[in-house]
Amino acid sequence: MRRFDARTVLVTGGTGGQGSSHVRAFHAEGANVVIGDIDADRGNTLADELGSRARFTHLDVTDESSWSVAVRAAESAFGALDVLVNNAGIQNPPAPIEQTDQATWSRILDVNLTGTFLGIKAAAPALRRAGGGAVVNIASTMGLGGTAHYAPYVASKWAVRGLTRTAALELGRDHIRVNTIHPGVIATPFIQEPAAGATAAIADFYSPEPFAIPRLGEPTDVTRLLLFLASSDASFITGSEYVVDGGLLLGPALQAEAA
């Protein structure tokens, strides 16, 4: 029996580099998958590829009514919602705080933080109706430290940590677990291509050469952990944070000849 047979998973940002990896892996493990995204062309293409156990739903994570539609779509198509993966996120063009306009600040927090809040709010009743389940919020290593020129993104991911812990306390007695994954530099367009209005990508600022594991991460590195946290194998884990960064946050690994 596969880990997610007869279970339904909603993944936001489900057409992106990490999101599509998550969707495919849950589907391969037997799940019904609901692909939430604003990109209808890519979402429908992915759903058609996966077949009858996949649905695309247009989801603007900043819109509470859009969330209601997505949750109803999951329950209507498959009978229940068992797992929510809050994966959707955007980054700001790199700029110092003094040169970051308020509209940029508000937009980043609206998607990355408010979108996660609205997701938990909308999904909690459905997860409760299903008898329990799991929420996994995809944050960032930038939510565990400061990063110059990314104040809105950093602030949003720090806030997701507090939101996750609060939700874990509120929902635990309903058999709903809430955890956070903090990816480092993962080889996806989100990291390797500049954000809208930017000329540099996040990956331009991070060489993996000093990492303890000297490579960029792959989406599957995050997905494998996600599958564990969303499964019954993690039934005693809630309010916790998991880092997938190849040792980025540890500091530089010295070569033997340099030590």
Image: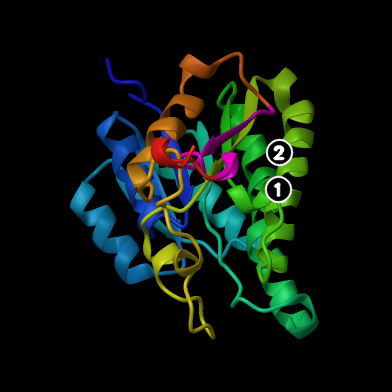
Q: Which mark is residue 45?
A: none
The residue at which mark 1 appears reads as 160
Dot 1: what SS?
A: helix
Question: Is residue 147 magenta-colored?
Answer: no
Counting from the top left corner in percent of width and height, residue 212 is at 45, 38
Counting from the top left corner in percent of width and height, residue 79 is at 44, 34
Question: Label 1 is placed on what type of residue?
Answer: Val
Q: Nearer the viewer, residue 167 or 221?
A: 221
Give, as a single range, the part of the protein colored magenta: 239-251
> Which coloring applies here?
rainbow
Label count reads: 2
Q: Which mark is residue 164?
A: 2
Q: In the image, is 184 to the left or to the right of 169?
A: left
Q: Residue at x 51, y 81 (%)?
A: 196
Question: Label 2 is placed on what type of residue?
Answer: Thr
Counting from the top left corner in percent of width and height, residue 64 is at 67, 60
Cα–Cα span, label 1 and label 2:
6 Å
Counting from the top left corner in percent of width and height, residue 2 is at 29, 20
Q: Nearer the viewer, residue 147 or 40?
A: 147
Q: Quadrant of the N terminus?
A: top left
Say above or below: 144 vs 44: above
Q: Please tell me in which quadrant of the rendered image residue 250 appears.
A: top right
Q: Look at the numbered discs 1 and 2 and tell me whether their residues touch, using CB distance below 8 Å.
A: yes
Q: In the image, is 153 to the left or to the right of 181?
A: right
Say above or below: 185 vs 25: below
Q: In the image, is 216 to the left or to the right of 120?
A: left
Q: Nearer the viewer, residue 41 or 151?
A: 151
